[in-house]
Amino acid sequence: MALDKIDYKILDIIQDDGRIPLKELGKRVGLTRQAVTRRLKKMVEKGYIIKFTADLNHELLGRGTIAYLDIIFKKSFTPEVERQALDYISKINGVRSANTTVGEKYITVKIRAKDMQELNHIIRSIQNKMPDISTRTVIVNELFFTNNKITYSED
């Protein structure tokens, strides 16, 4: 399924408001509610839309501490070691994302914690589970913005 201009416009709109009524969405892209529903269903089935979710205010919810943890593998780095590490990290509450890098043998992890004590607990649990690593932590002093939207339409 190739996306057309209308599909891209739908994607732009739902990134701003995932709860927009389908009738309103259809009106904004020049389609009926039923046509928009079909397009959304196809985009979900084909994997263009992964999930519909809420953007939470983590600071108000008590998880205002943000840190990036670089996990540096000292020696025995294999695809299996990487998979095991990512599997373990993915189950830790507070871990928001993990990315592997090209070049150095790193995994960079974004963590949201309620305070420094919880952050230290998360870091220590990773270090204890993977003893053949070193870590480097960067703590965010002030978050200016988070932009989750990428514009795809050609307007």
Image: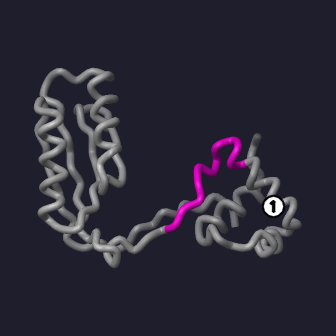
Question: Where 78 falls versus 82 (above or below)?
Answer: above
The reply to whether the magenta stretch includes residue 76 is: no
The residue most toward the bottom is 60
**Residue bearing the label numbered 1:** 36
- The residue that appears at 66% across and 60% down in the rendered structure is 11
Highlighted range, magenta: 43-54
Relative to 57, 78 lies left or right:
left
Relative to 44, 94 lies left or right:
left
- The residue that appears at 75% across and 51% down in the rendered structure is 41
Assign the C terminus to one quadrant of the image: bottom right
Question: Where 9 falls versus 45 (above or below)?
Answer: below
| Mark 1 surroundings: few (<14), some (14-19) or many (≥20) residues within 10 A | many
Amino acid type of the residue tagged 1 in the rendering? Val
- The local secondary structure at tag 1 comes to helix
How far from the left and from the top, in percent, is residue 113? 24, 63
Q: Taken as a whole, is the magenta stretch helix, strand or loop? A: loop
How far from the left and from the top, in percent, is residue 32? 88, 66
How far from the left and from the top, in percent, is residue 12? 64, 64
The reply to whether the magenta stretch includes residue 45 is: yes
Q: Nearer the viewer, residue 155 or 60?
A: 60
Q: Nearer the viewer, residue 20 or 31?
A: 20
Assign the N terminus to one quadrant of the image: top right
Relative to 3, 144 lies left or right:
left
Q: Nearer the viewer, residue 97 or 60?
A: 60
